[in-house]
Amino acid sequence: MYLRIFSGVMTMFALLLTGCESTLKERFADVPPKTHEFDASTEEVYAAAQDAFKRLDFKIVWKSMGRIQAAGSIHHSLAMGDSRQLTAELRFRDSGSGKTGVEMWLTQDVTGEGMGSSYRKPLPESDFFPLYFSNLQQFLDLNRGAKEAEKK
């Protein structure tokens, strides 16, 4: 009797672990950043990047010259029984001749109510990348227009 129960539990445990290998590899895989180059100084891009995050309802979690980390709102799903939050990290590099390269990594933090599971999943592809980069460019254009108006 105990042997049947033990073998049943072991079979269920083995089935549970079978699907974990691929998801663990995905979660810890190195994901290259999305990059975009802007025709502005590092200081200008750094300031515009913060404004772009604010427009998209992200909170700046940490910043230093050359690096910004921001987090979006937490979205609760009753149907899935979990909470999700998008986090972003930016790094800036001077590309020379007045240009600045921006590297961006996105991760999705997921916290499940069932069994207390939580994990961080890197996002190699997302609609957020082009949305954010276009917002950043809009703030650069806006700031450039304001500076030109001041000169006149």
Image (cartoon, grey):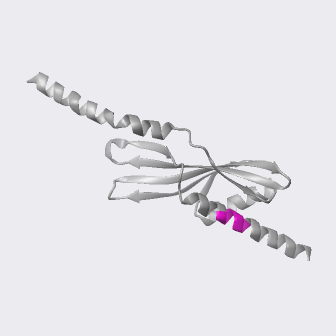
| Placement of the C terminus among the 4 image quadrants | bottom right
Can the viewer see residue 65? no
Of residue 47 and residue 92, the one placed in the foreground of this image is: 92
Above-or-below relation of 114 to 11: below
Residue 60, quarter of picture: bottom right
Location of the N terminus (image quadrant): top left
Q: Which region is colored magenta?
A: 134-139
Q: Is residue 79 left or right of residue 36?
A: left
Q: Quadrant of residue 3?
A: top left
Q: Nearer the viewer, residue 12 or 36?
A: 36
Q: In the image as oriented, which residue stretches furthest toward the left?
A: 1
Q: Is residue 108 left or right of residue 91?
A: left
Q: Residue at x 62, y 61 (%)?
A: 132
x 78%, y 68%: residue: 143
Q: Is residue 89 magenta?
A: no
Residue 138 is covered by the magenta coloring: yes
Single out the residue that lies furthest toward the right. Answer: 152
Residue 90 in percent (x, y) is at 66, 50
Which residue is located at x 56 percent, y 38 percent? Answer: 30
